[in-house]
Image: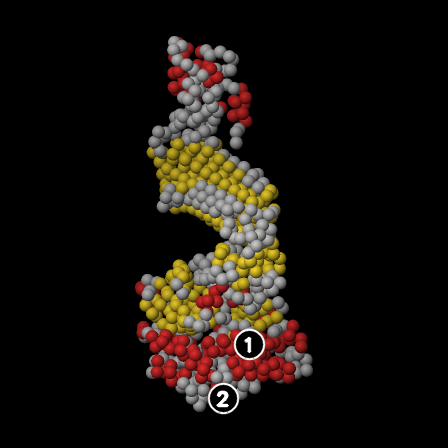
Amino acid sequence: MQSNRKRQIRSAGIFAAAFLTVCGLQMPVSAAAAGDVNNDGSVNKTDVQELVTWLTTGSNTVSRSGADLNSDGKIDARDLTLLKRAVSAIPEVPAEPVYIHLNQNGITYEGGNIAVSGKTATISTSGEYYIDGSITGGQILVNIPDETLDSATVKLFLNGVNMVNSEAPCIMVENAENTSVNLMEGKENTLSDGKQAPPEEQEPVYAVLHAKDDLTVKGSGKLTITAGTEYGIHCNNDLKINGGTLDVKTENADAVRGKTSVTVKDGIVLIDTEGDGIKSTKGNLDVTGGTVQIKSGKDALQSETEMNLLGGTVQACGDRGLKAGGAITLDGTTLLATATDNACENLGATAQPSIQAAFVKEWSKNNPLTLTDTGKHAVFDMNTLKKYRYALISAPDLQTGVNYGLWAGGIQVEKNGQTGFAASATANYEGVNNTDTADLLYSDFFDQSRVHKVEVKMPDATWRDFIAHSQDEAYYACDIVIDGETYENVGIRTKGHSSNQFVYQAGDAGHDKYSFRIKMDKYDKYQNYHGLTEFCMNNMYSDPSCMRDILCYNAMYDLDAYAPICAYTDMYLNGQLYSFYFLAEQPGTTLGERLATNDDAVLYKAADVGMSYDCTFASDMALNNFEVKFGTDDNLTHIQDIVTAINQVTPQNYKFVEDVIDVDSFLKGFAVNAVMCNYDSYNGMMAHNYYVQYNNGKSYYVGWDYNLSIGNFMDYGAAATSDITTGMYQADESRRPMLTKLLAVSEYKQRYNTYVKQIVKLYQDPEATVNGWATLIRSHVKADPRYFFTADKFEENIAKSPNGLQVGGGGGGGFGG
């Protein structure tokens, strides 16, 4: 952008300086440019010598247009005077690079054309400037006195820089034709305004990296910019990002802004901002390569005119995804744009196939969007960085007219019962949602036809410390391999109540078979296994058969009741078999999300707060016995609604309760508990070990934790003789209104009996069922180096006996003989 002074110089036609060059760098000018006496494309001392020779001897040839500086039609001494003045005004560019060293006491440098005042280093000529060190309150100021005379690039090489300035930009380009910020290979650099986010949004004054002229960021190193109140990067002219890793976090204002235009050609751009992500305030925004990843509180990508996404990979997640005053062009880019408000504004027919989807419910972050072919193979898979309701998916290899499966968080979604989504130049789908029985991308991990393999990788010393602190149930970082797929920096902790304490009290390193909880996104909040964020490996404490859990869960599935999915797995530690486990989807975000079909869904855990075991729904029950695991309900409103409704049910007046709970889901859960003698549950003396899912105005029972079923909880198996018609064993009936009230209603009791009969039919041939599971797991039970029970005890426990599937000495658990 040319200043008024520059325009005045040019219009006066006084001399070459207006379009001349920079600092003796032999910048080219046109053949007819004033001052270019020898017509070599540059103006310098050689032109002075040539003009002197011509004026004194006439023995050489000069360019008339170049030598006539005052444009009076004559070449004379006045032109020589003007030329000498012009050349003498051109500053000398440092022949060698200049080195600038930052420290908390000030700034030192090696080389020329640097002026240091306090903690500000002013650069006044183009050239190469290598900057290193740390400083607070310091600034690199680029201020070329006359960029018409010095129009070459000011090259700033960041070589391990750490700058904090709460009063002004860390790097300020006041005046320069072009400035480049070069990120040196292997170096990490940080710039910050050192401020906290304001309590309310306020207008920023400057940017941490601020340029009033053209600015280019490139290289192969990394630059992290953080801003509490100011912009991250602001450029008054053309901003180009051509390489390096640029990580910008702003808590109040836009992250990256360019007035005339913004172009991303290469590199990695990571943005986390409460403002707009990348914004061109007066011109185009173009992405032709590189990787762009944006989490934005406003517009992820915004341009005043056109937006051209012509290459690279773009992940634009904001309140709005793409917003442009002109047309948006998609051609050659791999794009995911998600939003809570609008995924894309002004998108016409696209040059490459796309799919736009408007979801019925809002999805939380870390729910990747995936397109699959008919073989359930991913053809597009990209994660989301924040919650979303709208999505735009586009990629060069999508095919027009082809139906793809669409998955959110590993959960298949549909429209009007159809799971196929055809990509096209204008594909736009409204009313997209999942069902509570949707197919899952991660379901292969819970394929019950095989025993899976989970390998944990952790330094031996760290593992020993982890086990030594098992009772803390604190997360440790590890790498994990799930059926051959590797994930780094995953969270693992021990879990369980009595099972955890029992293993700890045993104090035997050979029997350190703790249950483990794996949290994929503990340390990387955007990591998941095909949408799954949490799973657990349960040690099957006190179950010599290793079948109690899976038999109960499968009974729940057969009734179409809610429960996590499950299977078996071997766990390896650093390449060595550790133990054999029961594998289950951990109730939490993923389970809550797949059971939710609207925005109001909440998943509650019957949480044993204070070991009260009183998640009973009795009229005086403390509501905070339940914990929210997914969704929002600070006041536990839906739990209170259940308590109020169930305690008003009578055999004659009961229909109203169906507006509050899904009666059948509770009847199914209680039927499984009763038939399978699972009395470490609501049906027994401890009303816990279950979840409640609120969805679409009703609450549903979610089954959980069946390892002490089939006569394995208290009284050495005597629970197998309990009264199935009441569904309770050793429970205080006065504090089990959900069971007593519902079963007192003839209609509900009949439905309960139907579910009981269905479970009995499912396991009408128990020998065949048990033998089938034994065939699958027998070799794994025998190979388990940390067994609770011997292989003989396993065989004894699964053998047919007059008392059914029992374990002598139930309830005490222990390592069998």
Q: Nearer the viewer, mark 2 or mark 1?
A: 1
Closer to the camera, 197 or 346? 346
Front residue of 110/404: it is 404
Vertical arrangement, residue 779 with respect to residue 632, above or below: below
Q: Mark 1 highlights which residue?
A: 559
Label 2, label 1: how far apart the Cα atoms are: 23 Å
In the rendered view, would you say 219 is above or below 534? above
Amino acid at pointer 2:
Thr
| Mark closer to the chain start, 2 or 1 | 1
Which circle marks residue 721 in the picture?
2
Residue at 44 percent of width and 58 percent of height? 524
Q: Is residue 626 visible?
A: no
Q: Is residue 289 visible?
A: yes
Give the class, few, some or many, for how many residues have Cα within 10 Å of label 2's Cα (few <14, many ≥20). Answer: few
Residue 467: % across, % down: 35, 68
State how the image is colored: secondary structure
- Give the residue type that dot 1 points to: Leu
Using the image, determine if residue 482 lies above or below residue 88.
below
